[in-house]
Amino acid sequence: MPGSEAAAAIICRGLSKTHPGGVEAVAEMDLAFSEGLTTALIGPSGCGKSTLLRLIAGLDMPSGGTVSILGRTPAEQRREGAISVAFQDPSLLPWLTVQQNVALARRLARQEPDPDHVARLIALVGLDGFAATRPAALSGGMRQRAAIARSLVTRPRILLLDEPFGAVDELTRRQLARDLPPLWQGRGTTAVLVTHSIDEAVTLSDRILVLSPRPARIVADLAVPLPRPRPADLDQNPQFRAIASLALAALSCG
């Protein structure tokens, strides 16, 4: 099993998914994700990365196998706000303000209102002064920041990120990738990130899993032993380039 079950926050045993019509998205897979670390999933388009993330979140039902999140089912953990998911589309409710969109996540998780915590998160993601603004008046990067704040407001122990920076321009993407990860990495949150960018995977993660073309199988399991906090010029680090090269080689052979 890639990863050790000792101190694992997420354990997948024999996990598989076949869509209606017989399309096999995820082959039988055993995985363990260490608590407090960030793991990136990379692979060809359509290989099953997002499907695997949705299976972990409990948003899709597996065709076989099980997922355990901190010893309980994904559905149980999601109901209590222990799991949070951030997608490429921020999916903010257009009739609510930034403050209301972020606070809504606590109400849906049946958590007590905490306006001070909501305000702190809004400020931490760089939206101080925009709490009363509706999504239509925000840029794409600002909406993504609001979505990240919403995903963190329940203080989740598991954070699942499906290309959260994929819909913004390159400059904004780099800024978000630098500014936002410390918000969850400093809280001991276990994060799983789907990305198409090898550089983003190396920058953000402690571990990279390279998936094969559909059905998804693990073809490489790479450690990313780079120091944190990670500097803006990390991509000039020889070790960074070496890990990126290994990931690219695994993708090419997968």
Image (cartoon, rainbow, N blue to C red):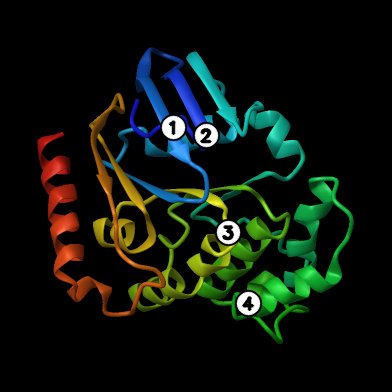
Is 47 positioned to the left or the right of 187 in the image? left
Q: Earlier in the sequence, mark 4 or mark 1?
A: 1
Mark 4 and mark 1: span between their CA atoms? 31 Å
Residue indicated by mark 1: 32
Amino acid under disc 2: Ile
Q: Nearer the viewer, mark 3 or mark 2?
A: 2
Report how far apart the C-alphas of labels 1 and 3 lie in the structure.
28 Å
Instruction: Kindly identify which numbered label has been placed on residue 124.
Output: 4
Q: Position of residue 21 (x, y in %)?
A: 41, 13
Q: Residues within 10 Å of mark 4 (few under 14, many from 20)?
A: some
Residue 90 in the figure: left or right of residue 171: right
Point out the tag, 4 or 3, that comes first from the N-terminus.
3
For disc 2, the marked residue is 10
Residue at 37% across / 34% down in the picture? 3
Residue at 61% across, 62% down: 147
Which residue is more in the foreground, 204 or 60? 204
- Taking 134 as reference, is 187 above or below it? above
Distance (Cα) linking label 3 and label 2: 25 Å
Which quadrant: the N terminus? top left
Residue type highlighted by circle 4: Leu
* Most distant residue in the front direction: 6
Q: Earlier in the sequence, mark 1 or mark 3?
A: 1
252 sits to left or right of 123: left
x, y percent for residue 65: 49, 15
Which residue is more in the foreground, 2 or 124?
A: 2
CA distance separating discs 4 and 3: 17 Å
Q: Earlier in the sequence, mark 4 or mark 2?
A: 2
Badge 3: few (under 14), some or many (20 or more) residues near its Cα, within 10 Å?
A: many
Residue at numbered disc 3: 90
Report the mark closest to the observer, 1 or 3.
1
